[in-house]
Image (cartoon, rainbow, N blue to C red):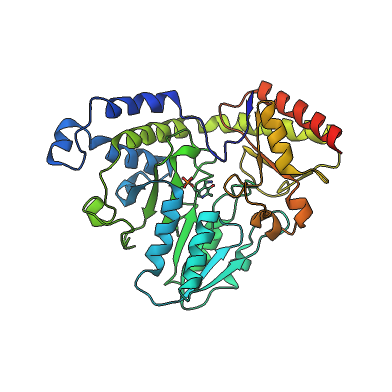
């Protein structure tokens, strides 16, 4: 079998699972009770923030992190932080943001906010000028993802952040780093120095599902989405110590094992070269852009990507058609359309995403099954 859908989710690392087990069994004292400190069940929460801050290249910013249920919540919360209590205003985002953010923007629009989107070029990259051209003095939020989930294309967030700070100092700058974590080196100190809000999710780097984090820079207020006393009243609910312990270990491993991404890039490049040899009509998206080492998105003209995903799954090869979050819906991906692909091309796009666990055998199986499938279908 070949699991090549790691942008959708990754396998929980056995070490992360082992770290979770005590909190799923014997260590069940409520972490936010007075006894939580004594029995050590509160400790994974601070440990997770400490490990995440190191993974984000900013160990001194651990206290600026709040654990959430994942990047969808973090994204919703970031938008809430920028818009709550204000009647209406202006938001700028890229046209290739994750559906969770797009839905939040849609709700802002319903509430009277003006939301404008900066388009990417044909390589899937959004130029800083495309964002700055939309800025206004009253812009409240600018949102740009670090790496796109469908193409893996890395966006120039450092440049954009600095420009936003200069041109629209009252705007909050939000960066969704979910797909970049554990795949490229991230430094909140250098690359993202101007980020006010940052979203991420544990299950994209071999941590448990259902836990992630939102970073808020000093001075950025986080009005609650979930009311309660925990996290200084910012996020209610009994914290999940097991999830936090798994997240901490996954973050530690992601940092230690980041060098393995060079090998992942080689496997990905080998995959693309072999596939082009078999299928010269194949078009790789974002090939000319700076991309994550693990992602390959490509158009096979004439192929129905949804059918291909199903046929490959029957052979044990797991890949995605566009983004997993939008699959099931018949609409072609908004990311592909924003890059200038036609409806037909967008519906003929497959995404293969590797992890540090991917083997050369899995890549060989995927090439074999995919080339056979395409030759028989076309
Ligand atoms: N942002 C991006 C860029 C993503 O790829 C994803 C996951 N597909 C999310 C946000 C949402 O993450 P979660 O599943 O943890 O809510």
- Give percent across and percent down for residue 93: 55, 64
Quadrant for the N terminus, please.
top right
- Left or right, 93 with respect to 312, comes to left
Q: Is residue 137 shown to the viewer in this render?
A: yes
Residue 188 visible? The answer is no
Residue 25 quadrant = top left
Picture coordinates of residue 170 (x, y %)?
Answer: 42, 72
Q: Position of residue 213 (x, y in %)?
A: 39, 47
| Residue 213 falls left or right of residue 363 | left
Residue 195, given in percent of the width and then of the height, sits at 44, 58
Q: Residue furthest top?
A: 361
Total labels drawn: 0
Q: Is residue 341 above or below residue 14?
A: below
Compared across the picture, whether 36 is left or right of 207 comes to: left
Name the residue at 73% across, 43% down.
Answer: 305
- Does 317 appear above or below 344? above
In the image, what residue occupies the spot 37% across and 44% down? 53
Q: 37 or 264, which is in the foreground?
A: 37
Give residue 21's quadrant in the image: top left
Left-right relation of 242 to 258: left
- Quadrant showing the C terminus: top right
């Amino acid at each position: 079998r070949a699991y090549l859908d790691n942008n959708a989710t990754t396998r929980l690392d056995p070490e992360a699972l082992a770290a979770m087990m005590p909190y799923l069994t014997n260590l069940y004292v409520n972490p936010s009770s007075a006894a939580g400190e004594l029995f050590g069940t509160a400790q994974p929460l601070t440990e997770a923030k400490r490990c995440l801050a190191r993974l984000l290249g900013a160990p001194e910013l651990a206290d600026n992190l709040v654990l959430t249920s994942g990047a969808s919540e973090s994204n919703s919360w970031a938008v809430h932080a920028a818009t709550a209590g204000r009647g209406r205003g202006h938001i700028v985002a890229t046209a290739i943001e994750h559906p969770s953010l797009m839905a939040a923007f849609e709700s802002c629009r319903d509430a009277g906010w003006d939301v404008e989107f900066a388009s990417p070029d044909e390589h899937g990259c959004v130029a800083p000028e495309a964002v700055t051209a939309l800025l206004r003095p009253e812009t409240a939020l600018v949102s740009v993802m670090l790496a796109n989930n469908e193409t893996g294309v890395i966006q120039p967030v450092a440049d954009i952040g600095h420009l936003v700070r200069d041109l629209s100092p009252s705007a909050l700058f939000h960066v969704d780093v979910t797909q970049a974590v554990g795949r490229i080196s991230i430094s909140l100190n250098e690359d993202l120095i101007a980020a006010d809000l940052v979203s991420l999710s544990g299950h994209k780097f071999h941590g448990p599902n259902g836990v992630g984090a939102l970073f808020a820079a000093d001075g950025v207020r986080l009005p609650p989405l979930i009311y309660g006393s925990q996290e200084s009243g910012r996020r209610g609910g009994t914290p999940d110590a097991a999830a936090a312990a798994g997240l901490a270990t996954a973050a530690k491993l992601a940092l230690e094992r980041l060098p393995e991404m060079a090998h992942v890039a080689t496997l990905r490049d080998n995959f693309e070269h072999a596939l082009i040899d078999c299928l010269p009509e194949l078009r790789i998206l974002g090939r000319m852009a700076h991309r994550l080492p693990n992602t390959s998105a490509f158009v096979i003209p004439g192929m129905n990507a949804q059918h291909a995903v199903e046929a490959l799954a029957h052979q044990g090869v797991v890949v995605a058609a566009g983004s997993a979050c939008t699959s099931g819906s018949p609409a072609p991906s908004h990311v592909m359309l924003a890059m200038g692909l036609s409806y037909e091309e967008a519906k003929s796009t497959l995404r293969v995403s590797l992890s540090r666990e991917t083997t050369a055998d899995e890549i060989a199986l995927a090439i074999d099954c995919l080339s056979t499938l395409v030759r028989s279908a076309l």
